[in-house]
Each structure stands twice: as structure tokens, then as C-alpha cells.
Image (tube, helix red, strand yellow):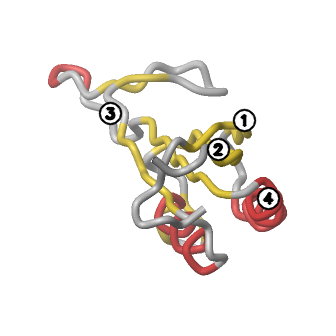
Amino acid sequence: MESVVEATKLTVYIGDSFRYRHRPLYRAVVEMLHDEGIAGATVIHGIEGYGGDKQIHTARILDLSSDLPLVIIAIDRKEKIEAVLPKLDEMMEKGVVTMEGVRVAFSRPASI
């Protein structure tokens, strides 16, 4: 087994309706992370949540929302994650960004 690697997890909390230059924000963020060489990113579509507006958005059929929560998770070395923060800040009008240290047990193919 490979040795454990210290890395940083970037988590971006946004909504379906968020845009950047007339495009879905999540797509723009993933493309930016890819272009910057971040090891990997995943977009997770939530079924219910709320943010700064305190309005609950849900996927329940009777309350179907057009602004469900999205979470973008990216993992790479700390310096690479920190390097994309200014670009991410410029792209986001709303939302929350967090960073936390993680230990990567293995990555196949090795990318971190």
C-alpha cells in the first residue's frame, strides 16, 4: 500500500441557479479547477438545503425548487488549492467556500 499523503479538501457550497458569465457557476468552477491542474473535483447535487437567504430549497415533488443545493469538492496539495482561491473568489457572488486538511490513503491513478 502506498504511503498516506497530506492534502487539502476544497468544498464550495452554491445553488443550481448561480451563474458566472451567463453559465452555470458549477460548470465554470469545475472547468477552472481542471484548467489549473487540480487533481480532481466532483459536483454533488443536493435534494434539500438552504443558504444565506434562509429559504429552504427542496426536490420534494410538491415543493419542487429550481435552486437546489450543489456542493463542489476538490482535493489536491495545499499550495495548489490555495492558488485557485483568488480565481474562485472572483467567480462567486454568493456561496460558501471551506478548506480542510485531509489524509489521502491512496489515489489511483496517483494524482496528488
The residue located at (63%, 38%) in the rendering is: 103
Name the secondary structure under disc 1. Answer: strand
Q: Give me the disc on residue 49.
A: none
Q: Is residue 59 toward the left or the right of residue 71 in the image?
A: left
Q: Compare residues 36 and 67 and report the one nearer the observer.
A: 36
The residue carrying mark 1 is 100
The residue carrying mark 3 is 65
Q: Disc 1 and disc 2: Cα gap in Å?
A: 5 Å
Residue 27 percent location from the top left of the image: 47, 66
Q: Residues within 10 Å of mark 1 (few under 14, many from 20)?
A: few
Q: Compare residues 39 and 53 and report the one nearer the observer.
A: 39
Question: Which is more N-terminal, label 3 or label 2?
Answer: 2
Q: Amino acid at mark 4?
A: Leu
Q: Amino acid at mark 2?
A: Lys
Front label number (4 vs 3):
4
Q: Disc 4 and disc 3: Cα gap in Å?
A: 29 Å
The residue carrying mark 4 is 85
Question: Which is more N-terminal, label 2 or label 4?
Answer: 2
Q: Residues within 10 Å of mark 2 (few under 14, many from 20)?
A: some
Q: Disc 1 and disc 3: Cα gap in Å?
A: 30 Å
Q: Residues within 10 Å of mark 3 (few under 14, many from 20)?
A: some
Q: Amino acid at mark 3?
A: Ser
Question: Which is more N-terminal, label 3 or label 1?
Answer: 3
Residue 3 visible in the picture = yes
Q: Amino acid at mark 1?
A: Glu
Name the secondary structure under disc 4. Answer: helix
Residue 20 percent location from the top left of the image: 60, 66
Residue 76 appears in which quarter of the rendering? bottom right
